[in-house]
Image (tube, coloured by chain):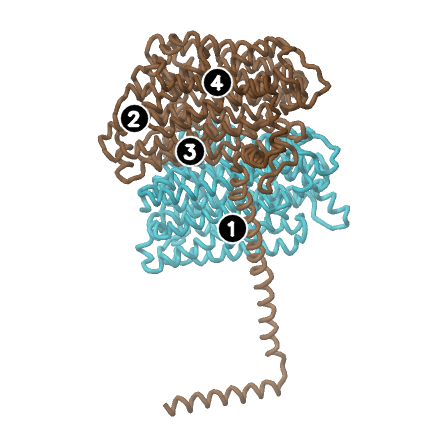
Chain colours: A cyan, B brown
């Protein structure tokens, strides 16, 4: 194994190119169909760059030691601004790249319909060019977050995800979109500011804002000693900030609004990708920096994770709106990420990071399904009015089933692997006595049953039984369906090709754990 | 022998499924490509299974094929055919092929034809993977695959028309409906089995942490270590229960049997293959696979605690098996749906297999490996004979339902007049179920009871013996009612014999039940050989039946029951329907049994209704949280702002007053402090 430094600034290119494409589309005021298609395909291609690069890098076995972009900048005592990928971030980068690139194509039809609809209703909204600018900036910023090595850089990218996504909701969202976008902005900004306060402590006390050493690409390591008594406080600020971003139980309330009322392609990015990045940040930044503090909180965090899973799942069961249902399901799924991370084991953290990718695939499929119905069936999103859709939309139903299987952890979806890793990680800590094992078993039985229940119950409500409203359309091989099936295919490939992904997660999580605790 | 052949056994049906998926996506609508793909891939799998299986049994050397997949967590694509797997792969693949052929005719013209055969092949691949996997996670993948296929096929007619329901429409027990639509049944199946699978995953994880491997052979060779270590902490029984929780759920053992009952909404060949012959046997296969490992592990650990806890575990297994056998048999007595009777019977008969496996394990106190192997082999023997005769019964029911255009036996009758071959077949299969010599069911059932007798488990034995008599009763009732009596509610459809593609498979199966019984000496040798070649077992088994007083009692009981039931209906013309209308006691008993001991309603009240209640509650909590953040806090901030703004309106007289009050207060404080 060797550490690879790329010969050219691939990661910087993959962050900037989509933005440039978007900028071109916006300034060029792209409106005609052909030009939009060109923009969409260009966006998809540029966003796919890191994903394709990862396939190559996995194939040559370069991911485990980390792949650094040759352009990095020394900022004196603020550390080094660099972009890099390693085993821990690779599934996250892949998740972002896959979903954003495919949804870029999916957006063509969805957003055109949406904009036409809004303009018919007499609203003045920006066109497709502006959409692609915001969409690409949002996507590129998420890539940047996953590729960062330094907290200053990380925070800038964090704010860069927030502003475009806020505007995307405000311009093209549904319902009371002005209020909801503001609500989303304030909530996640509070999270970001709490995190920022933590960052400032971290940077000033340790003398650097790096969390990964460049060019070695190793975690900075345990900083509890340097921070002394304030370590707990700093860790708490950062943790709380990330928890709000992640929308765990108690501070989740913004998510159902934002994710349900955002335009559906944006929901497909917000829900699995953006909130999961908070989980990634916990594993990447907090775990190696504050290992003893987090181990001290482990029981509470594990409890909170189970609470989030069960709460999100059971509240999801009561939703009548397809997208709001999916939003609550995302809350529930974030519980699994938190569970894996808070187990503080290499296996659990690896499971959480893989679950990021799994959830990205599964939830993207489901949001895209919801969007397909909205586009083709005149805004149909009320689950009570669905039922029997499988007969009209057989392939869509099959895809949705696969999406749900990701959430439940059933093969041949890669959800099996992340579920198994999280279970392995958690039981490793909680199986040393009869009482512990019994308790953790009951918790898992409850949590995973709830996940299965809301998934399959909703599958039945939407796709089985008799049609509950008059629908005369039939499944078309539209761009919407084809992009959904593409995500399904990628999910299947990830299931079979998870050997290297999991192998490199091992290397990365061992590094986190050994340097940390 | 090329080891890769062993992996091809389960790969071929998967290939078939993939090919069909591609055909479907590329828009092929015709039926022929799908049926040919299925039949061919299943036939090849069956041939391969036979080649490998016979090779293993003859050469005495298990076949192992390993390919790495995910090294960190020790997941390998590994296939292992030993004695147990050889029998299972051959049984599963040939039954699948026969039932696949039957399906081609049965499903003709169905709107879900491609989907049916896709999941059918997918199921067979998964099932073969379960019975031949060497890696626990591979086994689990197959296991979940069978669950997924079962879910999809139970809900095959997911549009939920009434003709596809199970149960009497409108009937309720404890206020909850006792009729189920296909989509509801599919949901039940996946929820019940998934629950068990979670336990299985946790059990696997605990063992993985102790052994560092998922290889079943590795777990077996380290069995002494983990068994002793867990026993020392008093956790062995719990871990074993968790590990086999999935097996109990999959094999529809009490209290998980409910999903199997309603699984009858699926097309009948599916009920025959998945819900009678194969998938529900996956659970007992898992127990048979692990019982020798657990048994030898406890002995090897040399720990007294391990032996005690292992015995405790096996007693639970035997107890659950016996209870399931009995409860489900009583339900079968009163049911009025052809397939439902068979479903009750299936869960009940699998109870016998658990009973035998549990009883065999309970012998651990005596450390008698030969008796243990005999008990395990008895369970396997019953698995095999049951798979064959129950598949035959289900395939016949498929034709019966088709002819009657109804699932209720009240609308069937006099079939013996119109279909002679079918009548002979059902009597062969039915008497085998009732345990009458010289059919295979007699031998295997007596052997399972013998295992209980050897282990000295009196209550288990008594429940098993009573169940044998109940089995004879409901089987006879079913066959007499459908084949030899006039229908209670005449239908306009005139019965006729089945077409060859359907007739031949079940006739072959019924004859197999007879042949295996006649050639039991030979079958016994094969099974004993298999037992010798099974991982961690390695001992020949005794599968001979001697006419002891116990055997004579059970057999006599069963035979006389058949006579009595036949006489009640045919000679004395007892009308049970009238009886129930007249007598209150009879009606209460009838309702209790017909509503399945109210177990379904109790489970629903506890879990489904309970969770719906909790979810409504949490929904309200969510409103509360929403209100707090987005209204409460906002209103508070608004009011606070109003109050503070009110103080800053630029009115001099107000400021003067404030100035005076504050100065006075300050002076007062100063004076008070000074006075102290």
The tag on residue B245 is 3
The numbered mark, 4 or 2, whose residue comes first in the sequence reads 2
- Can you name the residue that lies furthest to the left here? B302
Q: CA distance from mark 4 to mark 2?
A: 33 Å
- Structural distance between the alpha carbons of marks 4 and 1: 68 Å
Look at mark 1 in the image and give the residue it sits on: A247
Instruction: Name the residue carrying label 4.
Output: B560
> Numbered disc 2: what chain?
B
Q: Which of B315/A264 is in front? A: B315
Asked if marks 3 and 4 fall on the same chain, the answer is yes
The numbered disc on residue B363 is: 2
Question: Residue B290: image x %, image y %?
Answer: 35, 26
Using the image, name the chain to which the residue with label 3 belongs: B
Residue drawn at the location 56% of the way across and 54% of the way down? B622
Camera-side residue of A287 and B199: B199
Query: Foreground mark, 4 or 1?
Result: 4
* Mark-to-mark CA distance, 3 and 1: 34 Å
- Circles 4 and 1: CB distance less than 8 Å? no
**Above-or-below relation of B557 to A222:** above
């Amino acid at each position: 194994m060797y550490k690879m430094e790329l010969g050219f600034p691939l990661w910087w290119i993959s962050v900037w190119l989509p933005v440039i494409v978007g900028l071109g589309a916006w300034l060029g005021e792209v409106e005609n169909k052909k030009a939009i298609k060109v923009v969409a395909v260009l966006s998809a291609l540029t966003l796919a760059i890191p994903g394709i690069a990862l396939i190559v890098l996995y194939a040559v076995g370069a991911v485990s030691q980390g792949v650094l972009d040759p352009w990095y900048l020394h900022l004196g005592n603020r550390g080094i601004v660099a972009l890099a990928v390693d085993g821990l971030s690779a599934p996250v980068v892949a998740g972002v790249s896959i979903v954003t690139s495919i949804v870029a194509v999916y957006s063509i039809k969805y957003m055109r319909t949406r904009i036409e609809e809004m303009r018919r209703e007499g609203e003045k909204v920006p066109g497709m060019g502006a959409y692609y600018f915001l969409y690409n900036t949002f996507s590129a910023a998420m890539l940047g977050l996953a590729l960062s090595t330094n907290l200053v850089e990380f925070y800038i990218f964090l704010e860069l995800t927030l502003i475009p996504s806020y505007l995307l909701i405000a311009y093209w969202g549904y319902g009371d979109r002005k209020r909801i976008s503001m609500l989303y902005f304030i909530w996640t900004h509070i999270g970001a500011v709490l995190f920022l306060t933590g960052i400032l402590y971290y940077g000033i006390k340790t003398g650097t804002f790096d969390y990964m050493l460049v060019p070695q690409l190793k975690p900075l390591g345990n900083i509890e000693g340097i921070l002394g008594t304030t370590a707990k406080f700093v860790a708490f600020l950062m943790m709380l900030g990330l928890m709000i971003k992640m929308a765990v139980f108690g501070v989740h309330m913004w998510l159902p609004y934002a994710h349900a009322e955002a335009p559906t392609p944006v929901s497909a990015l917000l829900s699995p990708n953006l909130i999961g990045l908070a989980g990634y940040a916990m594993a990447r930044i907090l775990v190696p920096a504050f290992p003893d503090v987090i181990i001290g909180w482990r029981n509470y965090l594990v409890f909170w994770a189970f609470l989030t899973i069960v709460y999100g799942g059971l509240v999801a069961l009561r939703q009548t709106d397809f997208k709001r249902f999916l939003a609550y399901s995302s809350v529930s799924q974030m519980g699994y990420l938190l569970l894996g991370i808070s187990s503080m084991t290499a296996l659990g953290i690896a499971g959480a990071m893989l679950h990021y990718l799994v959830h990205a695939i599964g939830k993207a499929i489901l949001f895209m399904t919801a969007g397909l119905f909205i586009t083709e069936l005149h805004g149909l999103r009320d689950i009570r009015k669905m039922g029997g859709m499988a007969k009209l939309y057989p392939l869509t139903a099959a895809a949705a089933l696969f999406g749900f299987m990701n959430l439940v952890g059933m093969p041949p979806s890669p959800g099996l692997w992340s579920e198994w890793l999280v279970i392995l990680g958690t039981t490793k800590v909680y199986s040393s006595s009869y009482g512990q094992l019994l308790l953790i078993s009951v918790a898992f039985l409850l949590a995973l049953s709830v996940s299965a229940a809301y998934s399959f119950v909703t599958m039945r409500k939407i796709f089985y039984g008799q049609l509950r409203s008059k629908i005369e359309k039939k499944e078309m091989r539209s761009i919407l369906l084809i992009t959904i099936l593409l995500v399904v295919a990628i999910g299947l490939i990830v299931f079979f090709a998870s050997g290297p992904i999991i192998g490199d997660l091992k290397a990365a999580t061992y590094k986190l754990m050994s340097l940390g605790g | 022998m090329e080891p890769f052949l062993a992996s091809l056994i389960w790969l071929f049906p998967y290939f078939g499924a993939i090919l069909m998926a591609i055909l479907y996506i590329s828009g092929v609508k015709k039926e022929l490509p799908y049926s040919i793909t299925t039949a061919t891939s299943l036939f090849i799998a069956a041939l391969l299974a036979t080649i490998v299986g016979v090779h293993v049994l003859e050469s005495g050397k298990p076949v192992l094929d390993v390919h790495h997949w995910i090294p960190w967590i020790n997941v390998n694509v590994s296939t292992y055919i030993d004695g147990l797997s050889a029998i299972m792969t051959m049984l599963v693949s040939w039954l699948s092929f026969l039932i696949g052929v039957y399906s081609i005719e049965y499903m003709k013209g169905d709107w879900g034809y491609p989907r049916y055969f896709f999941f059918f092949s997918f199921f067979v691949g998964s099932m073969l993977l379960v019975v031949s996997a060497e890696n626990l996670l591979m086994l689990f993948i197959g296991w979940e695959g069978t669950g997924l296929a079962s879910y999809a096929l139970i809900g095959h007619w997911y549009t939920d028309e009434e003709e596809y329901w199970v149960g009497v429409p409108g009937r309720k027990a404890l206020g909850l409906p006792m009729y189920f639509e296909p989509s509801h049944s599919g949901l039940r199946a996946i929820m019940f089995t998934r629950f068990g699978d979670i336990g299985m995953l946790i059990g696997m994880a605990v063992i993985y942490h102790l052994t560092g491997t998922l290889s079943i052979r590795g777990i077996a060779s380290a069995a002494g270590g983990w068994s002793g270590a867990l026993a020392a902490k008093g956790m062995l029984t719990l871990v074993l229960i968790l590990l086999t929780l999935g097996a109990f759920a999959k094999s529809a053992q009490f209290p998980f049997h409910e999903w199997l009952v309603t699984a009858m909404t699926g097309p009948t060949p599916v009920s025959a293959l998945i819900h009678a012959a194969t998938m529900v046997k996956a659970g007992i296969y898992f127990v048979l696979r692990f019982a020798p490992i657990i048994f030898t592990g406890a002995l090897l650990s040399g720990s007294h605690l391990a032996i005690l806890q292992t015995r405790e575990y096996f007693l639970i297994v035997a107890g659950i098996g016996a209870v399931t056998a009995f409860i489900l048999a009583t339900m079968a007595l009163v049911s009025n749906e052809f397939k439902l009777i068979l479903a009750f019977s299936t869960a009940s008969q699998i109870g016998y297999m658990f009973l035998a496996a549990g009883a065999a394990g309970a012998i651990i106190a005596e450390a008698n490996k030969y008796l243990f192997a005999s008990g395990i082999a008895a369970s396997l023997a019953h698995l095999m004979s049951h798979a064959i005769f129950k598949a035959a019964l289900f395939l016949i029911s498929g034709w019966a339902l088709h002819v009657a255009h109804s699932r209720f036996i009240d609308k069937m009758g006099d079939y013996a007049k119109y279909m002679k071959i079918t009548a002979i077949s059902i009597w062969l299969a039915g008497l085998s179920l009732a345990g009458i010599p010289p059919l295979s069911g007699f031998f295997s059932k007596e052997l399972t009871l013998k295992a209980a007798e050897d282990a000295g488990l009196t209550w288990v034995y008594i429940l098993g013996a009573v169940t044998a008599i109940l089995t004879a009763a409901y089987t006879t009732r079913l066959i007499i009612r459908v084949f030899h009596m006039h229908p209670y509610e005449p239908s306009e459809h005139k019965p006729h014999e089945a077409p060859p593609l359907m007739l031949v498979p079940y006739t072959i199966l019924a004859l197999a039940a007879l042949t295996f019984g006649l050639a039991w000496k030979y079958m016994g040798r094969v099974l004993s050989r298999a037992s010798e070649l099974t991982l961690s077992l390695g001992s020949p088994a005794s599968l001979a039946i001697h006419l002891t007083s116990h055997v004579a009692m059970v057999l006599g009981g069963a035979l006389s029951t058949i006579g009595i039931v036949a006489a009640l209906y045919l000679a004395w013309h007892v009308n049970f329907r009238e009886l129930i209308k007249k007598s209150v006691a009879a009606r209460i008993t009838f309702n209790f049994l017909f509503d399945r001991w109210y177990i379904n309603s109790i489970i629903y009240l506890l879990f489904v209704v309970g969770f719906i209640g909790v979810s409504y509650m949490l929904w309200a909590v969510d409103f509360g949280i929403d209100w707090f953040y987005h209204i409460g806090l906002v209103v508070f901030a608004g009011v606070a702002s109003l109050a503070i703004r009110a103080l800053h309106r630029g009115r001099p007289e107000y400021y003067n007053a404030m100035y005076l009050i504050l100065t006075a207060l300050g002076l007062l404080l100063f004076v008070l402090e000074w006075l102290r």
